[in-house]
Each structure stands twice: as structure tokens, then as C-alpha cells.
């Protein structure tokens, strides 16, 4: 099992939050996917934002979050906006 903090974009604070929602390794994050992990985080930490979602996707893809393709960022933003309708 690979530590979350070994992934790009995942600092100690985000790793701790991920661990608190049952995602404790890089492999578990990859299995959950960015959207799945973000949904779990959003349920426990309502203040997580779109940048967190970008960071998760970047970690899975091994990219700086600001280097994600524009099309993928648009999909992630739409997902985040969709979740706002339920708060």
C-alpha cells in the first residue's frame, strides 16, 4: 500500500481527511476515483471545494492539479456544481 502523501497534490491535511472517510492509501484513492473520494469528503467536510476535487484527480493522474486538461476540469466542475444542488 502506497501512502497518500507520496501522491502529487496530497498533503498531510488532505491525506488525514481522506483517511477519516476510509481512504487510506493511493490504491484506495485510485479505486474510489476523484468523484467518489470527493463525495465522501463532501459528506463529512462540507467546506471542501472544487480545488480539492482537482487535487484528487491530479493525484490519480500524477499531474499538478492546474495541469489537468480543460475538458476534464469542466467535467469535474459540473460534478461539483451538481452536488451543490443537494446542500
Image (spheres, rainbow, N blue to C red):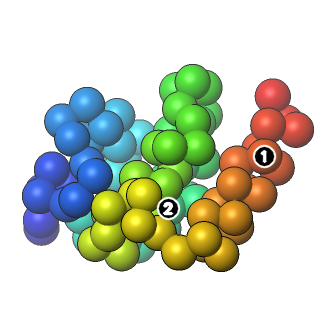
- Left or right of 23 in this view: 46: right
Marking on residue 81: 1
Q: Position of residue 15 (x, y in %)?
A: 25, 42
Badge 1 element = helix
Q: Is residue 3 visible?
A: yes
Q: Quadrant of residue 30?
A: bottom left
Q: Nearer the viewer, residue 73 or 80?
A: 73
Q: Position of residue 31 (x, y in %)?
A: 41, 72
Above-or-below relation of 44 to 67: above
Marking on residue 34: 2
Question: What residue is drawn where x is 11% and y is 58%?
Answer: 6
Q: Position of residue 71 (x, y in %)?
A: 65, 75
Q: Is residue 40 visible?
A: no
Count residues near mark 1 (Cα–Cα under 10 Å), then give few for <14, some for 14-19, many for 20+: few
Marking on residue 40: none
Q: Quadrant of residue 64?
A: bottom left
- Left or right of 77 in this view: 67: left
Closer to the N terminus: mark 2 or mark 1? 2
Question: What residue is drawn where x is 69% and y is 64%?
Answer: 74
Question: What residue is drawn where x is 12% and y is 67%?
Answer: 1
Nearest to the eye among marks 2 and 1: give it.
1
- Left or right of 33 in this view: 87: right
Q: Position of residue 3 (x, y in %)?
A: 12, 56
Amino acid at each position: 500500500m502506497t501512502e497518500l502523501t507520496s501522491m502529487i497534490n496530497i498533503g498531510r491535511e488532505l491525506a488525514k481527511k481522506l483517511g477519516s472517510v476510509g481512504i487510506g492509501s493511493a490504491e484506495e484513492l485510485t479505486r474510489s476515483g476523484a468523484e467518489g473520494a470527493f463525495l465522501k469528503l463532501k459528506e463529512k467536510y462540507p467546506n471542501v471545494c472544487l480545488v480539492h476535487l482537482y487535487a484528487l484527480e491530479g493525484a490519480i493522474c500524477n499531474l499538478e492539479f492546474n495541469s489537468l486538461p480543460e475538458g476534464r476540469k469542466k467535467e469535474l466542475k459540473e460534478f461539483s456544481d451538481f452536488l451543490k444542488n443537494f446542500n
